[in-house]
């Protein structure tokens, strides 16, 4: 609870009393509003049930599970290399980033590490999938408020990034490129030059979106002070990624843990924002996209020579043990708790996806907001359905 | 033109961008000692993977108290909560060649690190953001009476995780406000993530993955496993 002066407290009590009196005088019958499962604002099949009093939400509950694919069960009947095909489809806008923590967990159990060249290329592709993912968010943000133009810009510029990912991996959406012990292949010729150009384009896109959206008065008045999540609540719900940093918590798994990846070779800033409102969440994401471009620009200059694959047996058996690896994915902390019994496939995989925790705060944050704010708050929390339901 | 980002520097007072020192095993041992002083005998077993991670196992009765104690000890970030069924699957992993008679499956239950006595264990992960250290907490769940206390009192975020755990493993959570199903229909029978729940698609048609052990064109014939 923030500190209040006596004067503030008195005026708060007075306003509450006035509200209460008004509510008694103008009492309306409650109404239940159903948003989704099929609704353009819900990015897929998420259903929100909100009980309204007038225009105010008094109770809201997201109903997930329209897209549950049971990946945790399916991993138990697959071999380790086959699992990456599944987990590509969890957060389908940043697919490559989903593969990395699982591969790292398997490598940790096998006590091997990818060669330095593979680590750097992995990090580059990881950041490219973040850019592809978040640039769509930045464009989509406008659509939630009726601005159509940003989404066209986003789709235009995201295409350049997807072309890069396709050029390197062969897949636009589901690269399935990461292997235990390294990468499937080396980068194609000319890829680095093109990446450099595209990254400058994408930095330009961020500037464009910032001028177009973030400086817009309507955008600011719809987002500022709406859906405030204080830091302690954010931690209790396990929010991660930009949602956590927008509540003022300086926590980024790229910087704050020791992984065999190349983030320590790049110089980047972890942006935080003290406000914790919808605007802060979007603003932090915008800054992160810029930082990602800078990370890629730095890393393509320092790709070491060498192989991209370490020596691993052709039939991979992972030794018995338990490992937890999580990385800072586009949506937030994505982690895999992998239990192996020494077989070809994992014994159990617990998938900790970012959106599941990020959306579990919705009943809390929607309490007391007005109906139009439901959409902007959901948009600013940013979720992918596959990442909630898995 | 002047952009917002150039003028707004809201995190000027935030910590510097220098990475903090990563936690050593000394810190992890300190966490164990701290937890022992808070919950005493209920701390059953601990495991430290050198320079990597920390596991503790607590008594079932102390499950909720451990969450509260760790929260008081600085582990304020709730990462996840789930369960694990340690019984080997009686159906195998579906990889077996259907033309060959299957070998009998060894059904011994072996719990992972930090041991245990029961078939199903709940486990959760908490992170101390200031000290950059995480801990995985495990507790046994009674086979006949699979109920543990809810963590929702300490961590509101445990709500959905416990709902998921309830429908997937059939574990009850005392004190949970609303243990409805998250994913499955209300009339669904069985607990899908338990090992004795068959994966029907695999039972009907075995995985054709077995064919891909053919040698690749440029690779030697012999298996190098």
Image (cartoon, coloured by chain):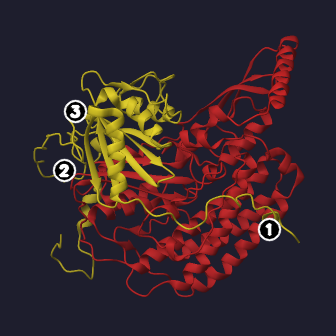
Chain colours: A red, B yellow
- Numbered disc in front, either 1 or 3: 1
**How far separated are the C-alphas under marks 1 and 3?**
58 Å
Q: Tell me the residue at 57%/65% (across/down).
A: A129
Task: Quote the CA–CA distance across marks 3 and 2.
Answer: 32 Å
Residue A197's spot in the image, x, y percent?
67, 81
Which element is circle 1 on? Answer: helix
> Chain letter of disc 3?
B
Residue on which disc 2 sits = B98
Which of pointers 3 and 2 indicates the residue nearer the eye?
3
Vertical placement of residue A75 versus B42, above or below: below
Q: Residues within 10 Å of mark 2 (few under 14, many from 20)?
A: few
Question: Could you tell me residue B72's position as x and y percent?
Answer: 47, 37
Q: Residues within 10 Å of mark 3 (few under 14, many from 20)?
A: some
> Can you tell which mark lies on residue B6?
1
A302 with respect to B120 (left or right): right
Q: Nearer the viewer, mark 1 or mark 2?
A: 1
Q: Which mark is residue A202?
A: none
Q: Label 2 lies in what chain?
A: B
N-terminal of the two: label 1 or label 2? 1
Whichever of callouts 3 and 2 sits on the residue coming sooner in the sequence is 2
Q: Residue at x 38, y 34 (%)?
A: B66
Considering only vertical position in the picture, is A57 above or below A151? above
Residue A78 percent location from the top left of the image: 31, 53
Of callouts 1 and 3, the N-terminal one? 1
Q: Helix or strand or loop: what does disc 3 sit on?
A: loop
Pointers 3 and 2 in contact (CB under 8 A)? no
């Amino acid at each position: 609870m923030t500190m209040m002066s006596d004067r503030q407290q008195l005026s708060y009590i007075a306003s509450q009393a006035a509200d209460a009196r008004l509510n008694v005088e103008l009492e309306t019958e409650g109404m239940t509003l159903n948003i989704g499962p099929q609704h353009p604002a819900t990015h897929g099949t998420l259903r929100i049930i909100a009980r309204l009093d007038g225009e105010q939400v008094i109770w809201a509950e997201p109903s997930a599970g329209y897209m549950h694919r049971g990946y945790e069960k399916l991993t138990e009947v697959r071999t380790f290399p086959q699992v990456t095909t599944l987990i590509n489809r969890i957060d389908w806008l940043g697919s490559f980033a989903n593969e990395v923590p699982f591969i790292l967990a398997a490598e940790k159990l096998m006590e091997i590490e990818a060669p330095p060249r593979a680590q750097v290329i992995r990090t580059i592709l990881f950041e490219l999938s973040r850019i592809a993912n978040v640039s769509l968010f930045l464009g989509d943000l406008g659509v939630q408020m009726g601005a159509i133009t940003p989404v066209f810009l986003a789709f235009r510029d995201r295409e350049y990034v997807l072309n890069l990912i396709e050029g390197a991996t062969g897949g636009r959406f589901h690269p399935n490129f990461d292997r235990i012990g390294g990468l499937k292949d080396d980068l194609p010729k000319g890829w680095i030059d093109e990446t450099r150009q595209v990254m400058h384009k994408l930095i330009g896109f961020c500037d464009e979106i910032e001028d177009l959206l973030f400086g817009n008065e309507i955008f600011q008045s719809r987002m500022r002070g709406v859906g405030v999540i204080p830091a302690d609540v954010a931690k209790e719900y396990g929010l991660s990624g930009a949602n956590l940093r927008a509540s003022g918590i300086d926590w980024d798994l790229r910087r704050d843990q020791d992984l065999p990846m190349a983030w320590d070779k790049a110089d980047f800033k972890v942006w935080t924002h003290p406000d914790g409102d919808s605007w802060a969440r979007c603003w932090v994401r915008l800054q992160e996209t810029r930082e990602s471009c800078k990370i890629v620009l730095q890393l393509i200059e320092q790709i070491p020579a060498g192989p991209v694959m370490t020596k691993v047996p052709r039939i991979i058996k992972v030794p018995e043990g338990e490992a937890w690896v999580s990385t800072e994915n586009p949506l937030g902390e994505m982690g895999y708790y992998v239990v192996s019994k020494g077989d070809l496939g994992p014994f159990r995989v617990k998938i900790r996806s970012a959106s599941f925790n990020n959306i579990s705060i919705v009943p809390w944050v929607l309490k007391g907001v007005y109906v139009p704010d439901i959409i902007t708050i959901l948009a600013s929390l940013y979720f992918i359905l596959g990442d909630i339901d898995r | 033109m002047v952009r917002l980002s150039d003028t707004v520097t809201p995190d000027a007072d935030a910590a510097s961008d220098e990475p903090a020192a990563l936690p050593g095993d000394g810190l992890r041992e300190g966490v164990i000692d701290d937890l022992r002083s808070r919950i005493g005998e209920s701390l059953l077993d601990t495991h430290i993977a050198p320079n990597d991670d920390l596991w503790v196992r607590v008594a079932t009765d102390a499950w909720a108290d451990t969450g509260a104690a760790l929260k008081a000890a600085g582990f304020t970030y709730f990462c996840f909560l789930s369960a694990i069924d340690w019984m080997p699957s009686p159906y195998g992993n579906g990889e077996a060649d259907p033309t060959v008679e299957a070998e009998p499956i060894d059904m011994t239950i072996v719990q992972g690190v930090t041991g245990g006595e029961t078939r199903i264990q709940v486990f959760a992960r908490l992170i101390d953001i200031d000290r950059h250290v995480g801990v995985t907490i495990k507790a046994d769940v009674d086979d006949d009476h699979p109920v543990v206390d809810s963590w929702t009192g300490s961590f509101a975020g445990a709500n959905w995780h416990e709902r998921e755990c309830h429908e997937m493993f059939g574990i009850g959570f005392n004190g949970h406000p609303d243990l409805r199903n998250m994913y499955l229909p209300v009339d669904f029978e069985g607990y899908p993530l338990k090992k004795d729940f068959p994966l029907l698609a695999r039972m009907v048609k075995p995985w054709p993955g077995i064919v891909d052990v053919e040698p690749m064109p440029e690779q030697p014939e012999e298996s190098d496993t």
